Every structure is written in C-alpha cells, then in structure tokens.
Image (spheres, grey):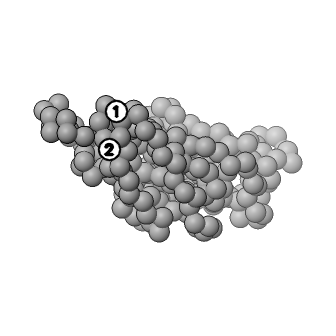
Amino acid sequence: MYIRAIVASFAIFTASQTSAAILDVTVLNPDKSGVDSIVLYAEPLDQPAPKIERKKIEITQKDRAFAPHITVMQRQDEVQFSNKDDFTHHIYSISGPNRFSFKLKSGESKALEAFEPDSSTETVAMGCNIHDWMSGFILIVDTPYFAKTTKTGSVSFDLHHLGKYRLTLWHPQLKAENNRLTQIVDISQNQSLTWQLSETFYEIQPKADEEDFEFLDEY
C-alpha cells in the first residue's frame, strides 16, 4: 500500500472556551472517505509536553507479519517482541540510531533495551531476515498526544493546555518529506478539525505463497 498526499483543505470549527481542550481531528481522502491507520501526533509549542508513566508495548509476530504493523510510542516505553508463529523469526531494524538484531524462536519473547535519550522524533523500520516480505515500523515521538486514525479517519486528543500545537500526519508510505505533513494550530477552546488530502494512491503489496515456507522446517 502506497499513499501520495497533499493537503487540500484545513477546516477548524470552535466550541466552548475552556482551560484545557479536546481536539477532534478527522483525516479524509479526496472523496471524503476516512483515511484509516495514519498516525497523527500533536506537539505543544508553548509549554513542555506533559509526562506520562512508562508503558509496556508488545509487538507480536503472527501469521508471518508484525502486529501491529505500525507502533507509536514514547522513548521511555518498554518494547517487547513476542513470536506467536510456529517457526523462528530473525528480527532486525534498518534505520535510526537504535539498531537491533536478534532471533526469536516460536513462543519466545524478548524485551528491547531502552532507547537512547533523544528529544527528536525517530522512525525505526523493521524486517525479518528469514521472511523478506515482513515489514513493520516503530515511530518514537516526544509527546503523549498521538494516535492512529480509525476507519472513519478520526482521532481525539484531550489536551492539558491551551496554546499552539504542531500537528503532524505520518505514515511510512506517505509521499511527503520525511513521510510527514504538518500544520500549526492555535488551540484556545475545544476544536473539531478536518484535514482533507488532495490526492491519495494505494498499491497493495504482493503476499507470499504457502509454499514459500517449506524451507522453515529446519528452524
């Protein structure tokens, strides 16, 4: 699946005044259908991002795929890989300063060491050395305000403070610089925002045949 996108419209509708704010965002295709599973995150520009507790995040290997395909997290979160297939995977990363590579037998789990401190956003692309078609992504953000859109293209953030925010759309196949599109919004009250893309293009990647797995009996 490939996405090509250019922002076409950016509509904001305001509601009641409040000391904090709820921000509802809907991301739409040109035909006004919802854009599913694209990442949206909001970075406060007028104050530091609020701190949240460390979370444990699991990325499974099931049916010869990473689940979820895209994981969004903060740098302090703990990531654990769990192999739920009946054969071995050799998981590795191919981008970013926090590289990793390890084999994981069926039924095993492995927690990654903490990612090195860095205030910038980082994208980690992952693959499997045994199954070349497998791919997955970890997006590390420096804000607790992040989510993937639903099938209707919607997300909602409960913002702790009013002020200016940088909103970023991200997807590993988004045709934009660094796979991102950004907008600055000034949040003074509850807001509902529609972000419509002017062009989208999807291409379905080929799937492997069952016979491709016959050689895996040795693992």
Side of 212 relative to 132 (left or right):
left
Quadrant assignment, res 166: bottom right
Dot 1 lies on which element?
A: loop
Dot 2 lies on which element?
A: strand
Label 2 – label 1 distance at C-alpha = 9 Å
Task: Tell me the crowding category of disc 1: few under 14, some 14 to 19, or many 20 or more residues within 10 angstroms, Cα based.
Answer: some
Which quadrant of the figure contains the N terminus? top left
Residue at label 1?
A: 85
**The residue positioned farthest toward the front in the image shown:** 218
- Give the residue drawn at x 82%, y 47%: 20
Res 173 visible: no
| Residue 98 location (% of width, % of height) | 48, 64
Task: Give whichever of 215, 188 is nearer the camera.
Answer: 215
Residue at label 2?
A: 89
| Residue 209 location (% of width, % of height) | 16, 33
Going by the numbered disc 2, the residue's amino acid type is His
Going by the numbered disc 1, the residue's amino acid type is Asp
Which quadrant of the figure contains the C terminus? top left
Side of 85 relative to 190 (left or right):
left
Quadrant assignment, res 6: bottom left
| Residue 130 location (% of width, % of height) | 25, 48
Quadrant assignment, res 22: top right
- Give the residue drawn at x 48%, y 31%: 151
- Give the residue drawn at x 79%, y 54%: 162
Q: In this view, does 174 lie above or below 215?
A: below
Q: Are the residues flagged by discs 2 and 1 in contact, CB closer than 8 Å?
A: yes
- Give the residue drawn at x 37%, y 44%: 104
**The residue positioned farthest toward the right in the image shown:** 19
Side of 141 relative to 208 (left or right):
right
Task: Tell me the crowding category of disc 2: few under 14, some 14 to 19, or many 20 or more residues within 10 angstroms, Cα based.
Answer: many
| Residue 10 location (% of width, % of height) | 56, 51
Res 116 visible: yes
